[in-house]
C-alpha cells in the first residue's frame, strides 16, 4: 500500500478564486490520479497525473479549469481555477503503486466549499 | 463502456447479523473489481479486490466478496456485522483489457449497523 497525505484537508473559498491542493506519497509511484466526489455523489476521475508530461483529462474536465502538476514521483498538485459553488466537492488523489496488484489507494481528501 | 450499479442506497442490519451490499457491473472485457469503504470525513479505504483466480475473495475487517461472472455481480458480505462497520461502501470496476487505469465507481451504499 502507500501512505498519502493531502493539503489542505478542507477550505472555504470565494467564487472566482483558485485553490491548489497538494498530494504527497511516501514512496515513488508512476500512476497518480485526481478524483472529485460531489456532495452525495460517487467518485469521478478528473485526470491522470503523468510525471514529466501533461496530465490526461477525462471527458468533461479541462486543463484550464483543473491544471495539474506532477514534478516528481511522490508529489502532485491539482488547482481548481475560477471557482464557482458547483465546484464544492471533495477532491481526492489516489496512487497505484508499481507491483501493487492493480490497486489504487486514496488520500484522505480535500473538502472544498465555494461560497 | 464501463459502469457499476449499487442498487441499494441504504442497507440496515442488526449487529451480529450477516450483511450483504450488492454490486453489479458492466465491462466489455475482463473486470477488475474492488470494494472501498468511506468513513465520515475520511478518504476511501481499500477493502478487497478480485483480479483473477478464486471467485471468493477475502479482505480487511472480515469482509469477503464473491465474483459471479454469469450474473456480473460482486456482492460484499460479512458473516456478523459490527456497529463499527457503519459507513459508506463503494464498488468499483476497471476493464483489464483496455489498458486504462481509471476506476469507475458505483453510487455508494450507506450501511448502518443497529446495536
Image (spheres, coloured by chain):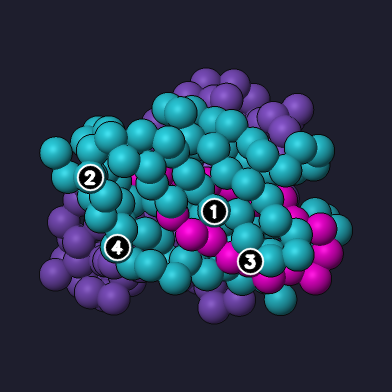
Which chain wears cyan? B
Choose mark 2 or mark 4, whichever is in front.
2
In which quadrant of the rendered view does residue B64 lie? Answer: top right
| Quarter of the image with the C terminus of chain B in it | top left
Whole-angstrom CA distance, mark 3 to mark 2, is: 27 Å
* Distance in Å between CA atoms under marks 2 and 4: 14 Å
Say which label, 4 or 3, has the lower sequence index.
4
Above or below, comparing residue A64 to residue A2 in the picture: below
Closer to the camera: disc 3 or disc 1? 1
Q: Nearer the viewer, residue B51 or B98?
A: B51
| Relative to B68, residue B78 above or below | above
Q: Is residue A21 left or right of residue A88?
A: right
- Residue that carries the numbered disc 4 in the rendered image: B10
Residue A107, position as x, y percentages in the image: 43, 38
Q: Secondary structure at mark 4?
A: strand
- Find residue A82 and name its label: none
| Element type at mark 3 | strand
Measured as percent of width and height from the top left, residue B81 is found at: 32, 37
Residue that carries the numbered disc 2 in the rendered image: B14
Horizontal side of A60 relative to B52 (left or right) equals: left
Badge 2 marks a residue whose secondary structure is strand
Give the CA separation, mark 2 to mark 1. Answer: 19 Å
Which label's residue is closer to the chain start, 1 or 4? 4
- The residue that disc 1 covers is B75
Q: Which chain is purple?
A: A
Amino acid at each position: 500500500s502507500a501512505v498519502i497525505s493531502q493539503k489542505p484537508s478542507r477550505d472555504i473559498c470565494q467564487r472566482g478564486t483558485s485553490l491548489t491542493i497538494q498530494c504527497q506519497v511516501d514512496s515513488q509511484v508512476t500512476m497518480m490520479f485526481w478524483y472529485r466526489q460531489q456532495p452525495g455523489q460517487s467518485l469521478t476521475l478528473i485526470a491522470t497525473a503523468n510525471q514529466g508530461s501533461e496530465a490526461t483529462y477525462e471527458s468533461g474536465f479541462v486543463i484550464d479549469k483543473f491544471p495539474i502538476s506532477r514534478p516528481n514521483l511522490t508529489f502532485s498538485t491539482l488547482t481548481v481555477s475560477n471557482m464557482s459553488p458547483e465546484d464544492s466537492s471533495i477532491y481526492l488523489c489516489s496512487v497505484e503503486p508499481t507491483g501493487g496488484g492493480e490497486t489504487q489507494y486514496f488520500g484522505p481528501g480535500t473538502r472544498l466549499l465555494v461560497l | 463502456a464501463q459502469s457499476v450499479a449499487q442498487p441499494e442506497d441504504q442497507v440496515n442490519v442488526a449487529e451480529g447479523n450477516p450483511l450483504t451490499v450488492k454490486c453489479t457491473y458492466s465491462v466489455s472485457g475482463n473486470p477488475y473489481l474492488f470494494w472501498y469503504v468511506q468513513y465520515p470525513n475520511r478518504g476511501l479505504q481499500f477493502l478487497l479486490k478480485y483480479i483473477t483466480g478464486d471467485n471468493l475473495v477475502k479482505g480487511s475487517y472480515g469482509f469477503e466478496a464473491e465474483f459471479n461472472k454469469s450474473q456480473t455481480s460482486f456482492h460484499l458480505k460479512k458473516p456478523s456485522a459490527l456497529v463499527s462497520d457503519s459507513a459508506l461502501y463503494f464498488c468499483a470496476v476497471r476493464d483489464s483489457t483496455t489498458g486504462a487505469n481509471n476506476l469507475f465507481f458505483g453510487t455508494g451504499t450507506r450501511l448502518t449497523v443497529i446495536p
